[in-house]
Amino acid sequence: MRAMHELSLCENIVKIIERQAARDGFTRVVTVTLSLGDLSGASEESLSFCFPMVTKGTVADGATLAFVHTSGCDLRVKEVEVGD
């Protein structure tokens, strides 16, 4: 059931992006970069699998998910690249 944990994480990531889009006025996200710590308990593979499912119909629909690996417990949105 590991992917269920990552599904919930992806849903929260999309909520963060949607709030940022409403605040900053962008309508399309190209890339989302996450800081992912080795001790975060999250799987890059599972996050990558779940992300496209939860972004359908959102500003992040079709966006690429990228990772910056850290040695700590990080799991946070590091950067959101917006498009036209």
Image (cartoon, rainbow, N blue to C red):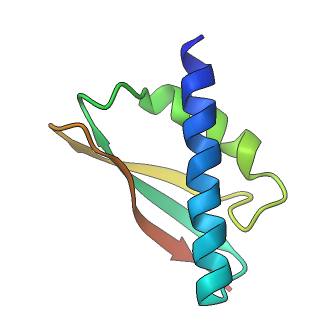
- Residue drawn where x is 73% and y is 52% of the image: 55
- Residue drawn where x is 53% and y is 35% of the image: 47
Judge whether 9 appears above or below 59 on screen: above
| Residue 13 relative to residue 79: left or right | right
| Residue 46 relative to residue 41: left or right | right
Judge whether 16 appears above or below 43 on screen: below
Q: Position of residue 35 (x, y in %)?
A: 32, 50
- Along the line of sight, which residue is nearer the eye, 45 or 59? 59
- Residue drawn where x is 60% and y is 10% of the image: 1
- Residue drawn where x is 72% and y is 80% of the image: 27
In the image, farthest residue toward the right = 57
Q: Quadrant of the C terminus?
A: bottom right
Badge count:
0
Residue 57: image quadrant is bottom right
Q: Position of residue 7 (x, y in %)?
A: 63, 32
In the image, farthest residue toward the top = 1
- Along the line of sight, which residue is nearer the eye, 14 or 68? 14
